[in-house]
C-alpha cells in the first residue's frame, strides 16, 4: 500500500461576492520535500493558505487531507496543529519585544491545575528541545529584537517545529523570508534543509523565483485563481521558465542597469559625511537621471540612507545639497524634504507608505496635504485624479479604480499606489527602500520600468536594497556599505553575482540549498 502524501487538497474553490478567487485547486505535497507555491499577486496563493489555516471557508466539495486523514472544513486551527501543520507568517512572524522563550511558547503555555501558575522550567525544556532538534541554540531569555537575522530565522523554524512530530508534519512558510538578507537566507535554508532531510515537509510561498529555483523540489503554479501546474519538478528549470508559467508569457523588459545616467557638474543630490544610528561618515552623489544603488550586510547602515535623505531619520552630522542648495540636516524634516522635491518609498508600505483604510485617490493626495486634507481643506479630487491617472495606467493598477480602498488591494498593487502617488508629483529625487520586496514578477517588471522612466525624465534615484537581482535590474552603479560607510563601488550595470561577491567579499554565489550537482540543477 502506497504512503499517502503529507498534504493533499482537492477541488478547493473560494468566492467573494461575484469574484471567484480560487477554482477547483488540487495539489499534493510529498513527505520530506520543499514544495513551492508561486503565482502573481492576486493569483490565489494567500487565499489557499488561508483555507489551509482555517481563516477562509472553501465551497462545498473541497477536501484537505494530512497524511491521508481528512480534515474537517473549514479547517480548525487546533485540529490542523494536532495533525502536524504549522505556519510561519510573513517576515517570520516574531514579536520583537518578547523574549525567545515567550515567542516560542506563546499560545502553548500551560498552567498548573491547582496553582494556575505557569511552570517556566517545563516551558524552557520544551523550547530547548526544538533547538536540540535543529542542532543550533539561541539564548532563551534574549528579546528577539536583539537577535541577529540568522538567529531570528532559527527561532521561527524552531517555533514551527513544535507542531510537527520528529520526521513528520508540514510547515507552511507564507512569504516568511521576504525581508531576509542573502546571508540570512543561506542560514535559513541550511536549517530548513536539515529539517526536511529528517522527513518534515515544507510548503514555500515566495515571490523570489531565484529562491524557488535554488531550494524547491517541486512547484505548483497558480494564475488567476486556477491551477497552471501541480507538483512540477523544479530540477533543470530556471527562473525564466518559472516566470513564464506564472505570467503565461515570456518575461521581457527587465534588462540590467538603469542606463539613464547623465553626469553633470551639479548633482541632483549629494550627501557627505552623514552620521546616524548606523551611519558613520556615509555619502552619496547622484546626477539627474542616474539610478544609484546602496547595499551591504544587514547591519552595515545602507538601509538608513533613504530615510536620512527624506528627513525621516535625523542625522547627527553631515551635509546635504539638493540641486546646488545646501540643507541643514539637523533641521531637515519630511515636509521640508517634500518641499525640496524629495520623495520616499519606504520598505514597510503598510505602516509607513499608505493610509490603508483610505482610497487610492486619498492616498495620492497625502503628500500635498500632509495627511490633513480631509480635515483642514477639501481635496481637489479632479486635479488629484488627473495627475494620478496616467501613473495608475502606466503601473497597470488592478483594479484601475481610484476609489478602491487600499487595504483591499494585493501587495503588488499597494506598492504601485505608493510609487504612483510620488511619481505624479514629478520629484527631483526619488529614494526607494526595497521597492519590489514581496511583489510578484509581473509587478516587479512594471515597477522597474516605471522607475527607469522617471530616471529618463531627469529624476535622480536612490535604491537601498539587499536584493542583488533588484539592484542589477535598476542601477547604473552600486555603492557597497560596511560599518556605516561606503567601502566599495560597482559600475557598469553590475550583475547579481558581482554584487553578492562585493557584499560578502566572496567570488562565488553559493546556492541557497545544497549544490547544483546534488539537486540536478544546471548552472
Image (tube, rainbow, N blue to C red):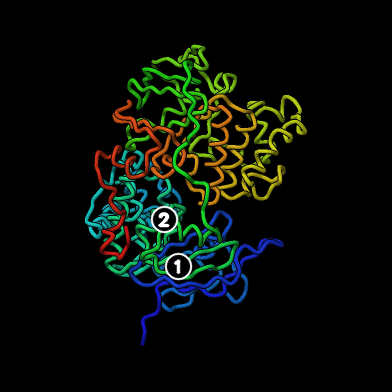
Please give left or right for residue 32 compared with residue 24 in the image.
left
Which residue is outermost to the bottom? 1
Q: Of helix, strand and loop, which one carries label 2?
A: strand
| Residue 521 spot, x, y in % from top left | 32, 62
Please give left or right for residue 483 compared with residue 248 in the image.
left
In the rendered image, is residue 111 in sight?
no
Q: Mark 2 sits on what residue?
A: 88
On residue 80, the disc is 1
- Please tell me which residue lies in front, 248 or 56: 248
Nearer to us of marks 2 and 1 is 2
Which corner quadrant holds the C terminus? bottom left
| Residue 252 spot, x, y in % from top left | 52, 50
Q: Quadrant of residue 275?
A: top left
Contact, mark 2 vs mark 1 (Cβ under 8 Å): no
- Please tell me which residue lies in front, 503 or 384: 503
On screen, 343 above or below 241?
above
Label 1: how many residues lie within 10 Å, few (<14), some (14-19) or many (20+)?
A: many
Please tell me which residue is depicted at 36% across the width and 68% down the height of the picture.
169
Q: Of helix, strand and loop, which one carries label 1?
A: helix
Please tell me which residue is depicted at 34% across the width and 35% down the height of the picture.
296
Q: Quadrant of residue 363?
A: top right
| Residue 32 spot, x, y in % from top left | 33, 69
Please tell me which residue is depicted at 30% across the width and 69% down the height of the picture.
199
Q: Earlier in the sequence, mark 2 or mark 1?
A: 1
- Please tell me which residue lies in front, 481 or 361: 481
In the rendered image, is residue 306 in sight?
yes
Please tell me which residue is depicted at 67% across the width and 26% down the height of the picture.
369
* Mark-to-mark CA distance, 2 and 1: 14 Å
Please give left or right for residue 432 compared with residue 494 in the image.
right
Amino acid at each position: 500500500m502506497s504512503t499517502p502524501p503529507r498534504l493533499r487538497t482537492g477541488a478547493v474553490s473560494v468566492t467573494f461576492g461575484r469574484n471567484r478567487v480560487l477554482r477547483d485547486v488540487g495539489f499534493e505535497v510529498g513527505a520530506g520535500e520543499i514544495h513551492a507555491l508561486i503565482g502573481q499577486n492576486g493569483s490565489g496563493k494567500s487565499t489557499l493558505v488561508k483555507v489551509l489555516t482555517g481563516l477562509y471557508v472553501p465551497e462545498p466539495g473541497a477536501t484537505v487531507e494530512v497524511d491521508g486523514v481528512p480534515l474537517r472544513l473549514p479547517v480548525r486551527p487546533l485540529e490542523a496543529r494536532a495533525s502536524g501543520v504549522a505556519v510561519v507568517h510573513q517576515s517570520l512572524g516574531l514579536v520583537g519585544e518578547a523574549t525567545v522563550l515567550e515567542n516560542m511558547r506563546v499560545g502553548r503555555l500551560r498552567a498548573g491545575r491547582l496553582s494556575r501558575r505557569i511552570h517556566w522550567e517545563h516551558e524552557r525544556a520544551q523550547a530547548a528541545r526544538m533547538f536540540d532538534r535543529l542542532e543550533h541554540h539561541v539564548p532563551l531569555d534574549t528579546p528577539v529584537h536583539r537577535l541577529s537575522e540568522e538567529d531570528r530565522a532559527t527561532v521561527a523554524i524552531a517555533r514551527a517545529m513544535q507542531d510537527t512530530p520528529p520526521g513528520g508534519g508540514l510547515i507552511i512558510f507564507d512569504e516568511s523570508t521576504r525581508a531576509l538578507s542573502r546571508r540570512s537566507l543561506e542560514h535559513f535554508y541550511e536549517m530548513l534543509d536539515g529539517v526536511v532531510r529528517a522527513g518534515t515537509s515544507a510548503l514555500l510561498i515566495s515571490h523570489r523565483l531565484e529562491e524557488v529555483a535554488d531550494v524547491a523540489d517541486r512547484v505548483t503554479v497558480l494564475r488567476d485563481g486556477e491551477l497552471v501546474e501541480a507538483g512540477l519538478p523544479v530540477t533543470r528549470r530556471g527562473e525564466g521558465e518559472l516566470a513564464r508559467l506564472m505570467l503565461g508569457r515570456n518575461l521581457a523588459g527587465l534588462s540590467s542597469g538603469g542606463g539613464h545616467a547623465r553626469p553633470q557638474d551639479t548633482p541632483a543630490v549629494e550627501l557627505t559625511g552623514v552620521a546616524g544610528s548606523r551611519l558613520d561618515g556615509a555619502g552619496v552623489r547622484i546626477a539627474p537621471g542616474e539610478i544609484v544603488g546602496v547595499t551591504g550586510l544587514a547591519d552595515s547602515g545602507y538601509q538608513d540612507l533613504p530615510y536620512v535623505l527624506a528627513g525621516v531619520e535625523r542625522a547627527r552630522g553631515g551635509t546635504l545639497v539638493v540641486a546646488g542648495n545646501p540643507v541643514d540636516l539637523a533641521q531637515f524634516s519630511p515636509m521640508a524634504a517634500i518641499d525640496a522635491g524629495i520623495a520616499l518609498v519606504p520598505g514597510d508600505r503598510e505602516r509607513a507608505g499608505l493610509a490603508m483604510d483610505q482610497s487610492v485617490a486619498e492616498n495620492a493626495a497625502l503628500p500635498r496635504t500632509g495627511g490633513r486634507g480631509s480635515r483642514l481643506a477639501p481635496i481637489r479630487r479632479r486635479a488629484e485624479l488627473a495627475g494620478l491617472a496616467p501613473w495608475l495606467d502606466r503601473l497597470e493598477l488592478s483594479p484601475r479604480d481610484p476609489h478602491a480602498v487600499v487595504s483591499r488591494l494585493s501587495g503588488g498593487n499597494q506598492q504601485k499606489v505608493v510609487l504612483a502617488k510620488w511619481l505624479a508629483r514629478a520629484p527631483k529625487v526619488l529614494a526607494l527602500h526595497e521597492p519590489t520586496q514581496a511583489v510578484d514578477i509581473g509587478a516587479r517588471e512594471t515597477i522597474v520600468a516605471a522607475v527607469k522612466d522617471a530616471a529618463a525624465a531627469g529624476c535622480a534615484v536612490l535604491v537601498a536594497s539587499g536584493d542583488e537581482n533588484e539592484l542589477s535590474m535598476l542601477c547604473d552603479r552600486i555603492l557597497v556599505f560596511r560599518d556605516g560607510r561606503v567601502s566599495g563601488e560597482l559600475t557598469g550595470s553590475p550583475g547579481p553575482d558581482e554584487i553578492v561577491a562585493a557584499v560578502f567579499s566572496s567570488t562565488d554565489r553559493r546556492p541557497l540549498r545544497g549544490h547544483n550537482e546534488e539537486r540536478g540543477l544546471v548552472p
